[in-house]
Image (tube, rainbow, N blue to C red):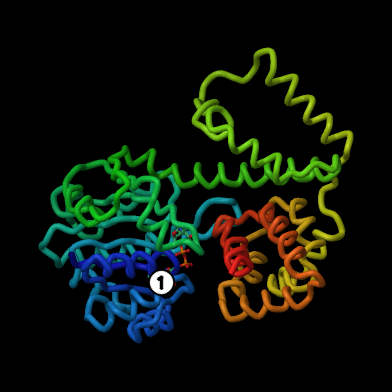
Amino acid sequence: MNVSVFGLGYVGCITSGCLIEQGNFVVGVDIDNNKVNMINHGESTVVERGISEYIRKGIKNNLIEATTSESDAVKKSDIAIICVGTPGTEQGHLDMKNIYSVVEKIAKILSEKNDFYIIIVRSTVMPGTFSNIVEIIEKISNKKCGDDFNVFIMPEFLREGNAIHDFYNPPYTLVGYDQMEGIHIVEELFSFLSAPLIRVDVKIVELIKLISNSYHALKVSFANEIGRVCKKLDIDSQLLMELFKDDKLLNISSKYFNPGFSFGGSCLPKDLNAFNSIANNYTVEDLTAASQLFLTVASSSMISAVALDIPVILYDFTQINYIDRYQYTRSVKRVFNLESMKIAVKNILLNVDVRKKTIKMQRHRIKPFAILDGKCTERNASVIMSYLSE
Ligand SMILES: NC(=O)c1ccc[n+]([C@@H]2O[C@H](COP(=O)([O-])OP(=O)(O)OC[C@H]3O[C@@H](n4cnc5c(N)ncnc54)[C@H](O)[C@@H]3O)[C@@H](O)[C@H]2O)c1
């Protein structure tokens, strides 16, 4: 199929690479000239295992090109996949302006296009996005949703650091729809996925990515709180959490997940209070000096933080449940650079006295390393882990 991909950042580059691997033709669009040039020179715009090879092959086989011209892209495609950034606003909303700007441009071109056109949104969105998009397109193009075009919301669940694997192996692929027209084309485009494609009311799909990430945030914070209490009690939090996770009947399961009545009974309230009182008794401070130090160091370079003193700093990472995107990306972007990653890991290895023993200890302590960020919670931890285990 002929597909245009709007936004050649993380999601867009992976989506483009994986779609051309499946024999589709992709026109990538970005407002960033550098990214467009990179793709046209056969280079990936992101560092991710395997993706450079896909893009290089795609250029060689004329299966991908990139442009800053939306018009060019829409004319050459039957489907547009929107993967532009939706950053957080000061009010805590997602800023949808990139999506609406792309949609306005597509709508202008649709007014001159006769073929049925499909728009898929893979960016993470706010509730109401589907209706807004349809309204914008109908108003600008004078075309009718269902007759001339259709819009589907399809959240992406990939994790940076594992993106190609996650793209091909999602838990499921949700197709949020309001009207059926063209849905079979979308299903055909993604028919190479083994996990099911599930048709769902678009309003549910608009919210599910935010719900999923909120839950991941809850898990990170919960694990860190347990880690902090355990530290005070001199208990191995890794072992405790491994055992906790082994219970797939109640703990890691769909139990206790139905909105409705409150929790109660003979055990939950008293045991929750007991754990809270333990935490209070052993006072778990908010940010210790070590975590403050981490925040300062991390804003200049995550790598140097890691290379400085892994055991001490990582130990206190459990104090931090949240680090804002600005600090996080500034520090973590370097981790993306695999060369600096290698140098950093080499530094770590050079700095330890009894190699194996200490590496084991580092690995042990890296595991609870859980800095929360909407962009990618586990990315740097998994990259570090993969290098340490080599
Ligand atoms: N990164 C992830 O792991 C991940 C996973 C799932 C979903 N998402 C969601 O996917 C979306 C994209 O995330 P990302 O990480 O790829 O973002 P990103 O910042 O890496 O890339 C976004 C790209 O969109 C481009 N862009 C912005 N406005 C544009 C416009 N008007 N026309 C064309 N291109 C434009 C930017 O130049 C940039 O290259 C976000 O909504 C994000 O929340 C991200």
| Rendered location of residue 228, percent (x, y) | 79, 45
Nearer to me, 381 or 144 = 381
**Three-letter amino acid code of the residue under disc 1:** Gly
Nearer to me, 16 or 162 = 162
Judge from the rendering whether residue 101 lies leftward or rightward of residue 347; answer left or right.
Answer: left
The residue positioned farthest toward the left in the image shown? 114
The residue identified by callout 1 is 50
Judge from the rendering whether residue 32 lies leftward or rightward of residue 68; answer left or right.
Answer: right
The quarter of the displayed image where residue 205 is located? top left
| Res. 131 in view | no
Mark 1: secondary structure: loop
| Rendered location of residue 169, percent (x, y) | 37, 53
Q: Is residue 29 above or below residue 222?
A: below
Residue at image point 25% right, 60% down: 140
Quadrant location of the N terminus in the rendered image: bottom left
| Res. 254 in view | yes
Judge from the rendering whether residue 191 lies leftward or rightward of residue 360; answer left or right.
Answer: left
Nearer to me, 200 or 314 = 314
